[in-house]
Image (cartoon, rainbow, N blue to C red):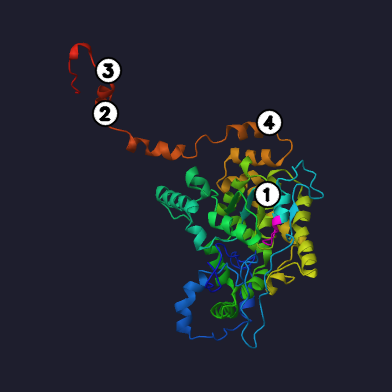
Amino acid sequence: MRFNAAPASHPPCQPAASDAAGGAAAGPQLAEAQSHYSASPPAKSEKAAKASVVDVLDRASMAGQKRPLEEGPVAAPEPGEQATTKHKRTPSASVNLRDVGAGAGHKANLKEGALFRASQILSADEMRRYGMRTILDLRRMDRPCKKAASNVHEARMRRLGTIISKGPDLIYPEKGKLYATRGHPKPCVPCQRHLEESIGFRAEAVMHADLIPTFVGLRIFAAMPQRVRMQAIVAAFRGKGASSVMAPAVANPLYMGYKVLYKTMLEDSKRGIATALRVFAEAENYPILIHCIHGKDRTGIVVMLLLLLCGVKREAIVEDYMMSEKVLKQSRMHNELDLDVYLTADDVIAATRDTMEATLDYLDHKYGDIDHYCRECGMEPWELSRIRVNLLEQTHPHDQELAAEGKKDALAPLKKMLEPMLSPGPGIKRQSQAMEAPAPKGGQEVTAH
């Protein structure tokens, strides 16, 4: 789901509305807040608005700006309108880029130079300096990426899992599906090519994990007051991008706030979270760079889960999360935060202690420990052990054994289920054995019974 009107020409992946462009219905304050707002008249007739609402909702999580790494001029705003985009330039330095393992205060035996986090503003020089092999993009895939051959297999397996499970994919839990039909990362060739054309750096693999699926975006749009919804639709029709309205609204605790957003992603985006975590279970993917738009919200959730899996202390996780706000504000002060104006507002780039502590409390109270939550997402114990082995300098012997054992064949359960249907019947087996038997001496013929 995307709010902004589709540009005439766009790169393979467009950024989402913001790291906050998704989530569940707002908290109890929403009902009270809605009473203070009345519907604003739309720019077009109500009939025309309803006819276009499907297209608008289909773009709910996409920002109205061009990709920051894309070259080309930005369209001038209409007379009397305030510009919501800035000219995009090729960055000389990455924004909010840091080595998570080398972060101050972790002291959890994390490997340095393995896990990096950043915003969507990347520099080719720094990518080469750190030897990045895999880039995990948490922004929503656009149509060219979904149609890529490397992503077709996942879509087919997902449909197969839906048929086998005999239930809607959104209802049937991930852990109850066959392993092969769960969320698995796939290289995205269009994004790999676009990254090389944009900044001159070719990663060995660019992968996606959608932490804001379509129905989550629908929920946040429906949760907004009517006035906000109409303003977002009008902004989308005018080509400015509804994210200029939705991003500040999502960051506002009166409507939703990041506490509600993070809880929603943890509950409703388990497939995307498992897809992201599986990237870190493969040793050949390292070093890995994970990013979204700001490198704060969706990236912060995945990094938080990785640090919990590695046994990092709670205070260190909170400090790592809060560091993003400090870095983003410094980049904005030095005119390095080359994003649209509404994506640089204080409320949008906020990363407070209270937000992360509330998220950690939610996981503790509902799931007890991180392993239990990851199992609910469809992760296997051997995958969690592999993540620890790949990110920690020293691991428990039990994790080493599980990581070494692994899964011999991810399609084994599916093959076992289909084996009776694919195996030949008894008559065919006897005829096959007779044909393979050596010819008898004396030129006698052999008749298959």
Q: Nearer the viewer, mark 1 or mark 4?
A: 1
Return the x and y of residue 91 as percentages of the image width and height: 71, 64
Magenta span: chief secondary structure: loop
Instruction: Name the element at disc 2.
Output: helix
Q: CA distance from mark 1 to mark 4?
A: 29 Å
In the picture of the structure, the residue carrying the numbered disc 2 is 426
Mark drawn on residue 397: 4
Magenta stretch, residue numbers? 118-124
Dot 1 alpha-carbon crowd within 10 angstroms: few under 14, some 14 to 19, many 20 or more: many
Disc on the earlier residue, 2 or 4: 4
Q: Where does residue 263 sit, x and y in percent of width and height?
A: 63, 59
Element at badge 4?
A: helix
Residue picked out by circle 1: 132
Q: Which of marks 4 and 3 precedes in the sequence? A: 4
Of the image marks 1 and 2, the number of the one nearer the N terminus:
1
Amino acid under disc 1: Met
Q: Is 376 or 282 nearer to us in this picture?
A: 282
| Residue situated in front as seen by the camera: 308 or 148 | 148
Q: Amino acid at mark 3?
A: Pro
Q: Earlier in the sequence, mark 3 or mark 2?
A: 2
Numbered mark located on residue 86 in the image? none
Disc 3 versus disc 4: nearer the observer: 3
Per the image, the residue denoted by label 3 is 438
Residue 364 visible in the picture: no
Real-space CA distance between mark 3 and mark 1, rounded to the nearest whole angstrom:
58 Å
Q: Quadrant of residue 417?
A: top left
